[in-house]
Image (cartoon, rainbow, N blue to C red):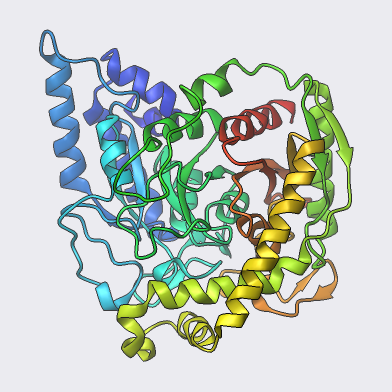
């Protein structure tokens, strides 16, 4: 049974541990064995919490064995991978940077504390580009993370280590962050589910820019129901986070579990959000997955959308955040990855009028999204416009037969959603002709996170 535990869902693992059909120790050992088998080739985990995970599992098993012990949490004994930009007490957290190669935090981030309180056991830290600034998971400290579907290919980024750990069944749950698409694009490239949450729903503490609403934390799992279970553990009001808000539902997992049909739901399918195009293979997989939701009772209408005029606003506001996040390192730019340092320098060149115009455009984009949601409950698009590309390549230079104007334009499908601080998920839509995973992006208005995951769950059922 131990050999099969790493193939179980998070829900199944929590039930097995709670009923003592399997011990937390057995669950941890199964996943540590999977890491030992697969991580050398994939480089998903950069720090493995072997002793800490075993100790936590032993303590949980002892508590469950005691008569009258409190009921276990909803994630009892479930291993969770934490992104290496999220502080973990007593466990190395480097942000993928040589500047912090030996950094060990004294306290957990609030999201880690919540996951532990729900019974989850931290399995280790997963790889990220330096300070999560990049859409390909590679850094000078640990190197590149490779795709479990084909180790020659990229996992995208920046939560690439977490996505690879899930796809390779080294972990059933992974925590991550998303600014321009960092939960969604790796989910698409690895064939898993990643949710960009409504800003404020998951408390961000500590955070250099605690009022920043385009950068959020969120869950990642192999299916939408597990993602919802993890979301429930992560959400809730916190005075530590100035944007924090309480969820408008009792349980996202309950919403997903009881959604057996999408009857009455109005869905829009848009082949793209900008003008960068989509590779035909990816577009066909996503269109088929979207139209298949009509069998689930939804009304699906194909629409043409163009939010490409928000591109420059996003790049400007991204530059502003780069400077804000790295104020303490402005004298160390030469020690950073050249791409990251270049983005910080571009941010330093911005003037107040640049930022004001970007905010004005952002407000306009927000209003256009709201008008769209008056007609539709959710909007579906391809998550990324291309299939996974060679890991040595930082980004694709050509999309849909057109050369990109900028390296960042290949993730316009996701950053044009982030610009309006909207929640969105990537769910597996199918495979290309070459057998590589394709993600369908499900976008909704603020606080529609459970509905997004319910749609993601039915998307999987309709395939």
Residue lying at the far top in this picture: please name it: 67
- Whole-percent x, y for residue 258 in the image: 59, 15
Can residue 387 be seen by looking at this rendering? no
Q: Is residue 159 above or below residue 329?
A: above
Can residue 251 be seen by looking at this rendering? yes
**Depth check, front residue: 375 or 449:** 375
In the figure, residue 315 lies in which quadrant? bottom right
In the figure, residue 83 lies in which quadrant? bottom left
Please tell me which residue is depicted at 12% across the width and 22% down the height of the picture.
62
Please tell me which residue is depicted at 40% across the width and 44% down the height of the picture.
244
- Whole-percent x, y for residue 14 in the image: 35, 23
Please identify the quadrant where the N terminus is shown: top left
- Whole-percent x, y for residue 272 in the image: 80, 56
**Depth check, front residue: 53 or 320:** 320
User: Seen in the image, is 401 located left or right of residue 447?
Assistant: right
- Whole-percent x, y for residue 5 in the image: 37, 29
Total numbered badges shown on the rendered structure: 0
Q: Is residue 396 above or below residue 426?
A: below
User: Seen in the image, is 40 located left or right of residue 122?
Assistant: right
Q: Is residue 396 above or below residue 22?
A: below
Q: Is residue 122 above or below residue 214?
A: above
**Depth check, front residue: 170 or 373:** 373
Please identify the quadrant where the C terminus is shown: top right
Please tell me which residue is depicted at 47% across the width and 32% down the height of the picture.
247
Please tell me which residue is depicted at 78% across the width and 57% down the height of the picture.
273
In the figure, residue 372 lies in which quadrant? top right
């Amino acid at each position: 049974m131990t050999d099969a535990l790493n193939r179980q869902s998070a829900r199944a693992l929590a039930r097995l541990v709670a009923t003592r059909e399997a011990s937390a120790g057995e669950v941890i050992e199964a996943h540590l064995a999977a890491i030992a088998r697969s991580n050398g080739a994939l480089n998903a985990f950069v720090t493995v919490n072997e002793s800490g995970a075993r100790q936590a599992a032993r303590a949980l098993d002892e508590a469950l064995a005691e008569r009258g012990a409190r009921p276990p949490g909803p994630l009892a004994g479930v291993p969770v991978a934490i992104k290496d930009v999220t502080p973990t007490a007593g466990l190395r957290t480097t942000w993928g940077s040589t500047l912090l190669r030996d950094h060990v935090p004294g306290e957990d981030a609030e999201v880690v504390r919540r996951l532990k309180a729900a019974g989850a056991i931290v399995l280790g830290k997963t790889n990220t580009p330096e300070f999560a600034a990049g859409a390909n998971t590679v850094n000078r400290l640990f190197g590149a993370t490779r795709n479990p579907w084909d180790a020659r290919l990229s996992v995208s980024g920046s939560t690439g280590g977490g996505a690879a750990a899930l796809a390779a069944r080294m972990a059933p749950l992974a925590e991550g962050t998303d600014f321009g698409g960092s939960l969604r694009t790796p989910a698409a490239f690895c064939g898993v589910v990643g949710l960009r949450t409504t800003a404020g729903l998951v408390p961000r503490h500590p955070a250099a820019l605690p009022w920043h609403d385009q950068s959020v934390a969120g869950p990642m799992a192999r299916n939408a129901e597990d993602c919802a279970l993890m979301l429930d553990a992560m959400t809730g009001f916190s005075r530590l986070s100035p944007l924090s808000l309480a969820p408008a539902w009792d349980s996202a997992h309950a919403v997903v579990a009881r959604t057996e049909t999408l009857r009455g739901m109005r869905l829009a399918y848009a082949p793209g959000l900008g003008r960068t195009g989509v590779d035909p293979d990816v577009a066909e997989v996503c269109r088929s997955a979207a139209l298949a939701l009509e069998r689930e009772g939804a009304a699906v209408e194909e629409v043409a959308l163009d939010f490409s005029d928000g591109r420059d606003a996003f790049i400007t506001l991204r530059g502003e955040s780069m400077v804000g996040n790295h104020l303490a390192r402005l004298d160390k730019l030469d020690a950073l990855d050249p791409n990251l340092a270049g983005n910080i320098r571009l941010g330093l060149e911005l003037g107040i009028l640049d930022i004001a115009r970007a905010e004005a455009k952002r407000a306009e984009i927000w209003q256009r999204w709201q008008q769209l949601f008056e007609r539709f409950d959710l909007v579906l698009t391809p998550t990324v416009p291309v299939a996974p590309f060679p890991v040595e390549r930082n980004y694709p230079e050509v999309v849909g037969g057109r050369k990109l104007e900028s390296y960042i334009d290949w993730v316009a499908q996701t950053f044009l959603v982030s610009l309006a601080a909207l929640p969105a998920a990537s769910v597996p839509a199918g495979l290309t002709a070459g057998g590589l995973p394709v993600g369908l992006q499900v976008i909704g208005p603020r606080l529609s996170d459970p509905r997004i995951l319910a749609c993601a769950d039915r998307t999987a059922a309709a395939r």
